[in-house]
Image (cartoon, rainbow, N blue to C red):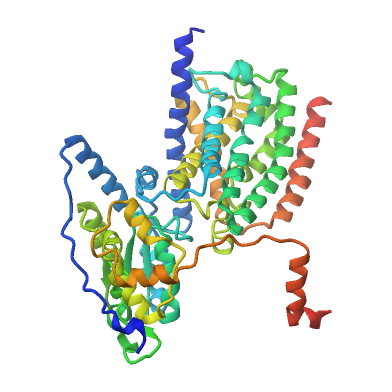
């Protein structure tokens, strides 16, 4: 591939991810509003929020690590974006693969932990310890899913996985080949996105939004940007592994929005699990399903 | 007669700055965009002091749905733009309100809901109630009524949106510009050793909002009594056991 072509792709992929992520945040808030019989926010609301947060005149920083933590959180996702194949662009997908991606997706949480640690707010510390415990809970089923998918396709290269699934019609999609692993991924999807019922680490009325408690202005804006990437990443990974990935934007976009909409529609109906229950639940059902799914595909 | 009573509280100066237009037309467009976004996205911290809080849930939920206007509740002062004070303010509560207000990042707006924040309302004769809120904090908009209906609350918020959009809502600057006035009133109520962790004078210097009204005899009094902030001591083990030992309830359990 030509060098300049790659450079353009590396620039375009995070920007596209951000724009699609904004639409996903809007969709999430609209779904929440409709479930509660409200109208919901206007179309450009996520952009208004982010511009407003970055234009605050007071920017309260608690030290160098606070700022570096947020840069790590957003930067980790921007780096992960170049590893996700989208229609027409593959970026660094051939060089990275699924394993690098799994590592890359842990960086934002660790960055947040560093930044929140510097704030020295007890609510923040409680929140981030819960968030990292939840990460421990959902990462093991997540690795099982990636492992199983790599075994079935015989490669860890995400672009090749898409190519293999596109050879025939729907019957060659991952969701038909390994339904149990797809179900596992669907079960852990709300946890990876940090949504109900696995959002005990945010818990606004108990620990005052946990990790976000000391974030204001541009720091909060960074977290809003991060949320866009988070939703987009969850949608694209599931689509790439199980729903045939994307060859054309016109089929790719409905798939990723559908994947994100499923946990959102269920989310607002449930109260939260406690952290230890998240751990117990994640290590019991999705992991059991994942292991059975792995046994089925390996026979 | 102690020292504090001898110092008169200064009158608040109205600083006619308003909407300063920058010479660069592109900068003007940028300012307009930022003000528009600020008006369309307001995170509110509702400090539910009195009975007015009961009108906020219907304003937020399905019946009147504030999120249509981009108004959402937030839980910490760091994240919030507007501080809603929804009822009578007792002297003790006012201390917390001032602490909260000073921790909010600028630009910040204060909304006083109910008659009690305007003039004390039915608590006019109470010895423990701070009657006129705007003596202690710069209030952007009052929503009068006992209590105002959700329609009135939303109408008031829309007025504030209009003010922010046109650049008129800059009352947060007055707190820095007239700090001596506000601090004087606060000291009259709380005593001369009143202080908050936020260094308002340093912030005023940082934002270039120092006027000759910022410093005065009351701030001199504040600086005389001010104790430097110290980090809380973290301790596990010995000290913790000692504190637990002093707790009578723990003893009974043993």
Image vertical order of residue B185 relative to residue A120, above or below: below
Image quarter hosting the C terminus of chain A: top right
**Could you tell me which residue is drawn at 34 percent across and 90 percent down?**
B1
Of residues B240 and B162, the one drawn nearer to the viewer in this rendering: B240
In this rendering, the answer to whether A148 lies above or below B27 is: above
**Could one spot residue B107 in this view of the protein?**
no
Nearer-the-camera pick, B175 or B120: B175
Q: Which of B124 and A158 is in front in this view?
A: B124
Q: Position of residue B105 (x, y in %)?
A: 39, 55
> For this view, does A123 lie left or right of residue B50?
right
Q: Can residue B35 be seen in this view?
A: yes
Q: Is residue B13 positioned above or below A277 on the image?
A: below
The image quadrant that residue B144 belongs to is bottom left
Q: Where is residue A27 in the image (x, y as percent from the top left)?
A: 45, 44
User: In which quadrant of the rendered view does residue B68 lie?
Assistant: bottom left
- Residue B111 position within the rendered picture, expressed as x and y whole percent measured from the top left: 32, 68
Q: Does residue B56 lie above or below B166 as drawn?
A: below
Residue that sits furthest to the bottom in the current view: B125
Judge by depth and name the residue closer to the eye, A117 or A292: A117
The total of numbered circles placed on residues is 0
- Residue at 28 percent across and 59 percent down: it is B173
**x and y, in percent, of residue A241 in the image:** 63, 27
Q: Which residue is drawn at 38% across and 90% down?
A: B127
């Amino acid at each position: 591939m030509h060098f300049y072509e790659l450079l353009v792709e590396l620039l375009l992929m995070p920007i596209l991810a951000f724009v699609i992520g904004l639409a996903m945040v809007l969709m999430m808030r609209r779904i929440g509003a409709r479930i509660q019989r409200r109208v919901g926010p206007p179309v450009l609301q996520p952009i208004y929020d982010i511009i407003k947060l970055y234009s605050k005149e007071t920017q309260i920083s608690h030290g160098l690590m606070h700022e570096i933590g947020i840069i790590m959180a957003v930067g980790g996702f921007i780096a992960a974006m170049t590893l996700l194949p989208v229609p027409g662009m593959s970026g660094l997908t051939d060089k990275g693969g699924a394993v690098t991606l799994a590592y890359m997706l842990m960086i934002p949480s660790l960055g947040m932990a560093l930044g929140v640690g510097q704030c020295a707010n007890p609510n923040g510390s409680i929140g981030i310890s819960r968030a990292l415990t939840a990460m421990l809970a959902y990462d093991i089923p997540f690795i099982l899913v990636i492992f199983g998918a790599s075994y079935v396709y015989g490669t860890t290269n995400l672009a090749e996985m898409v190519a293999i699934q596109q050879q025939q019609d729907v019957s060659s999609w991952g969701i038909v080949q390994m339904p149990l692993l797809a179900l596992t991924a669907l079960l852990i999807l709300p946890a990876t996105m940090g949504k109900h019922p696995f959002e005990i680490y945010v818990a606004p009325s108990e620990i005052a939004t946990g990790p976000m408690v000391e974030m204001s202005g541009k720091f909060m804006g960074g977290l809003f940007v991060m949320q866009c990437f988070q939703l987009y990443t969850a949608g694209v990974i599931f689509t790439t592994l199980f729903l045939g990935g994307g060859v054309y934007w016109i089929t790719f976009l409905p798939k990723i929005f559908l994947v994100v909409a499923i946990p959102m529609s269920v989310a607002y109906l449930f109260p939260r699990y406690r952290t230890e229950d998240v751990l117990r639940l994640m290590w019991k059902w999705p992991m059991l399903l994942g292991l059975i799914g792995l046994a089925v595909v390996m026979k | 007669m102690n020292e504090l009573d001898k110092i008169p509280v200064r009158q608040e100066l109205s600083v006619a700055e308003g909407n300063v237009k920058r010479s660069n037309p592109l900068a003007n467009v940028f300012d307009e965009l930022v003000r528009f976004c600020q008006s369309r996205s307001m995170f509110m911290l509702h400090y539910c002091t009195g009975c007015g809080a009961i009108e906020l849930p219907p304003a937020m939920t399905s019946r009147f749905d504030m999120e249509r206007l981009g108004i959402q509740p937030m839980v910490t002062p760091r994240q919030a733009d507007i501080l809603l004070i929804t009822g009578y303010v007792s002297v003790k509560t006012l201390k917390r309100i001032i602490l909260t207000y000073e921790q909010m990042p600028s630009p910040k707006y204060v909304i006083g809901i109910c008659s009690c924040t305007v003039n004390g309302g039915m608590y006019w004769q109470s010895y423990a109630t701070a009657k006129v809120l705007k003596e202690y904090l710069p209030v952007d908009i009052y929503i009068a009524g006992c209590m105002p209906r959700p329609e009135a609350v939303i109408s008031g918020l829309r007025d504030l949106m209009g003010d922010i959009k046109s650049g008129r809502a800059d009352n947060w600057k007055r707190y820095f510009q007239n700090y001596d006035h506000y601090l004087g009133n606060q000291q009259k109520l709380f005593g001369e050793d009143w202080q908050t962790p936020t260094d308002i004078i340093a912030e005023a210097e940082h934002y270039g909002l120092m006027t000759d009204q910022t410093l005065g005899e009351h701030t001199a009094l504040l600086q005389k009594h001010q104790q430097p902030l110290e980090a809380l001591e973290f301790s596990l083990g010995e000290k913790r056991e000692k504190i637990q030992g002093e707790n009578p309830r723990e003893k009974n359990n043993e």
